Amino acid sequence: MRSKPEEFDRREQSLLLYFETRLVDYVGRVASVQMNGDDMEIAKKLEEEGLLQFGRLTMAAIDSFRGHSLTQRYTHWVRFSPEAWTIVHQLRRERSDKMLAKDKDILESEMTKNKNVYTEAREARKQCLTGFPCPV
């Protein structure tokens, strides 16, 4: 069984991340309209590897889980093995690091600005507590 994120191709990684979102935000319910034929084959392959369980809901379950629109009709379910959770955690962390690196300059500027605002507010509060005039 593959156990490192780099052992999965881009499409497999993408599907694992999609499934992770569905598990966390939608209790494992999957809307198949957001998947294509390749995704279905990849899901089957990952299931054969023992990384996940993936199946179709019954019509009664599909009708009871229907979202607010037909595009959110849940048709399938997914569950991860502990190994899949480990892999997806690493993928999510790598994605976060990559996205943060892109916005590093903007983020650092905002963090510095917020720190300065916090410092100024703390100093103003200290001045109000110790005497007058209070700048606020």
Image (spheres, rainbow, N blue to C red):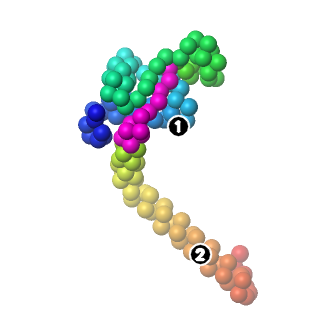
Q: Quadrant of residue 65?
A: top right
Q: Which mark is residue 85?
A: none
Of residues 94 and 89, the one drawn nearer to the viewer in this rendering: 89
Check disc 1 and report the residue beneath it.
24
Q: Residue at x 33, y 30 (%)?
A: 12
Say if mark 1 contacts mark 2, CB within 8 Å.
no
* Residue at the extreme bottom of the image, as rendered: 131
Name the residue located 44 percent from the left edge and 23 percent from the top edge: 54
Q: Which residue is mark 2?
A: 120
Point out residue 25 in the picture as x, y percentages from the top left corner. Answer: 55, 35
Q: The magenta stretch spans which residues? A: 76-88
Q: Quadrant of residue 10?
A: top left
Q: Secondary structure at mark 1?
A: helix
Q: Is residue 83 magenta?
A: yes
Does the magenta portion include 103? Answer: no
User: What separation in Å lies between label 1 and label 2 (alpha carbons)?
Assistant: 39 Å
Where residue 136 appears, as percent x and y from the top left, is 71, 75
> What amino acid is at disc 2?
Glu
Judge from the rendering whether residue 45 lies leftward or rightward of residue 56; answer left or right.
Answer: left
Q: Is residue 89 above or below residue 129?
A: above
Q: Residues within 10 Å of mark 2 (few under 14, many from 20)?
A: few
Residue 69 at x, y percent in the picture: 61, 20
Circle 1 residues within 10 Å: few <14, some 14–19, many ≥20: few
Horizontal side of 1 relative to 20 (left or right) equals left
Mark 1 or mark 2, earlier in chain: 1
